[in-house]
Amino acid sequence: MVRPFLIDCDTGTDDAIALAAAFGCPEIEVKAITSVNGNVAEKYVCQNNLDMAEYLGYSGPVCRGAVKPFHGSLHFSDGTHGRTGLGDVVLPQAKTKQFDPRLAPEMIHDAAVAEKGNLEILATGPMTNLGIALLLYPDLPSLIRHIWFMGGAVYGGNVTTTAEFNIWVDPEAAQVVMQSGIPLTMVGLDVTLKACMDPEDEAELRKDGGRASLLTADLLDFMFQRHRAGGEAALMHDALALAAAVCPGCLQTEDYYVNVECEGTYTRGHTAADVRHRSGKPANVSAAMKLDVEMFRHWLVQAVKNSRAQ
Ligand code: BDR
Ligand code: CA
């Protein structure tokens, strides 16, 4: 059976690659794409999602979503993804595709109802939309089969010493998700900092010549340049969360009871995993802790090449 997925994302260079790969995964069908503030403002994220959808021939709904986190002000990353989210890549602006009139939380609920408990969610940005949906629709946890999310870390952080970006932007929303009872797989920095692409991968995609392949190659090229200029390497944080769902052999997981630190003068946004199992609470999260990077890179290149748009 082809698994129904909804992708909630803050596109975002690596989110864009995750989307391109998702369109090429025969195991899943993307039922909707929802946008959230994060790497850049939501007005850029949703436009990137709409443009990606039209460019790569995705005909399902694309929705707008939360423009701010639960608390505090807007948080944007530091230019890691360029001014409008896709680095220096400029996609043709969508001409015919329009936003679905539903906002992300409603779309999440509608898709979950329509799929009768089989919907899986890939979340690659801050969890504001998911948190709102869970607060609005009490039946939602019973309708979602699994959430695969990029965010957090059992050990370490990238915005602060102890917090990863997606969770740090909206810890309150992430805590709602963490305590929802929905089966969760956390793909955090413990593994994503090792999920690095190589110029060989770019060359293979260019040789393929398909639309998704060339777009991904251009995004990788931006990332390699960014890295040469002292920024982040070509890390596939978000595509690795998709891999957890469809290429599980490339990851090893450990189960933990996890809370999100929503206070903490120095630790706000930390995903506090009970690694010593002292809380007596059952695990709520399966956390990816080891990565077979060669298997992952091979899977990702094949998935993008398999995206059918020409
Ligand atoms: C996460 O933050 C964003 O920069 C990436 O898109 C990824 O989802 C990594 O911390
Ligand atoms: Ca992201």
Image (cartoon, rainbow, N blue to C red):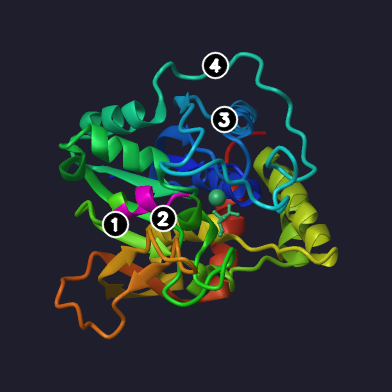
The local secondary structure at tag 1 comes to: helix
Name which of mark 4 and mark 1 comes first in the sequence. 4
Disc 4 versus disc 1: nearer the observer: 1
In the rendered view, tell whether residue 179 sits above or below residue 110: below
Taking the image as drawn, is residue 208 in sight?
A: no
> What is the distance, in whole Å, between disc 2 and disc 3 at their CAs?
19 Å
Range shown magenta: 170-175
Query: In what quadrant of the picture does the C terminus appear?
Result: top right
Q: Residue furthest front?
A: 265
Q: Residues within 10 Å of mark 3 (few under 14, many from 20)?
A: many
The amino acid on which the numbered mark 1 sits, given as a three-letter code, is Met
Q: Are marks 1 and 3 in contact (CB under 8 Å)?
A: no
> What is the distance, in whole Å, between disc 1 and disc 3 at their CAs?
25 Å
Q: Residues within 10 Å of mark 1 (few under 14, many from 20)?
A: many
The amino acid on which the numbered mark 3 sits, given as a three-letter code, is Cys
Label annotation for residue 98: 4
Name which of mark 1 and mark 3 comes first in the sequence. 3
The residue singled out by tag 1 in the image is: 178
Q: Was residue 174 drawn as part of the magenta stretch in this picture?
A: yes
The amino acid on which the numbered mark 2 sits, given as a three-letter code, is Phe
> What is the distance, in whole Å, between disc 2 and disc 1 at their CAs?
11 Å
191 and 175: which is toward the camera? 175
> What is the distance, in whole Å, between disc 3 and disc 4 at their CAs?
11 Å
Disc 2 CB within 8 Å of nearest ligand 1 atom: no
Disc 2 versus disc 1: nearer the observer: 1
